[in-house]
Amino acid sequence: MDKLEYYRQLIRKILTEYYKLAAKSPNSNLENALIFDENRDHYLLVVMGWQGEERIKGNTIHVRLRDEKIWIEEDWTEDGVATDFLQAAVPRDDIVLAFHPPHLRLYTEFAIA
């Protein structure tokens, strides 16, 4: 299996695990959805619904593949989804924390781009 296909499978697996955790949340007014666009390599876990009179809708996790690297576009998890990729033996050089501005990425332990 080539690297990109491995990353696709890994991303789907990790986001599905977060989806299952979110489904156990006691707040039944919020719904979680997995969105996998495998043709363009975008993978999202989104939350939507109502809390009282307030509409809630947003990305919990948005990951994409670009230039043979995993780009974490958005991550609102407690420990950070990058931790899950590291535990799955993805090299730090293949993970981009895209939610940081490019000029600050060089201060992280991950790829700049």
Image (tube, rainbow, N blue to C red):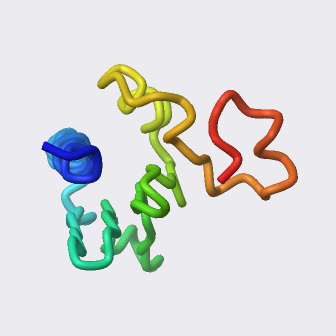
Task: Answer left or right for 87 relative to 54.
Answer: left
Q: Position of residue 85 (x, y in %)?
A: 38, 32
Q: Is residue 105 above or below residue 80?
A: below
Q: Is residue 24 above or below residue 83?
A: below
Which picture quadrant has residue 6?
top left
Q: Residue furthest right?
A: 103
Task: Answer left or right for 74 relative to 20.
Answer: right
Which picture quadrant has residue 31?
bottom left
Residue sitting nearer the eye, 79 or 43: 43
Q: Residue furthest front?
A: 2
Looking at the rendered image, the quarter that the N terminus falls into is top left
The reply to whether residue 26 is in sight is: no
Task: Answer left or right for 73 relative to 29.
Answer: right
**Which residue: 44% across, 50% down?**
70
Q: Position of residue 55 (x, y in %)?
A: 43, 79
Residue sitting nearer the eye, 79 or 49: 79
**Which residue: 40% across, 60% down?**
65
**Which residue: 84% across, 47% down?**
104
Label count reads 0
Q: Position of residue 81 (x, y in %)?
A: 43, 38
Residue sitting nearer the eye, 64 or 55: 64
Q: Position of residue 68 (x, y in %)?
A: 42, 54
**Which residue: 23% across, 62% down?**
32
The reply to whether residue 57 is in sight is: yes
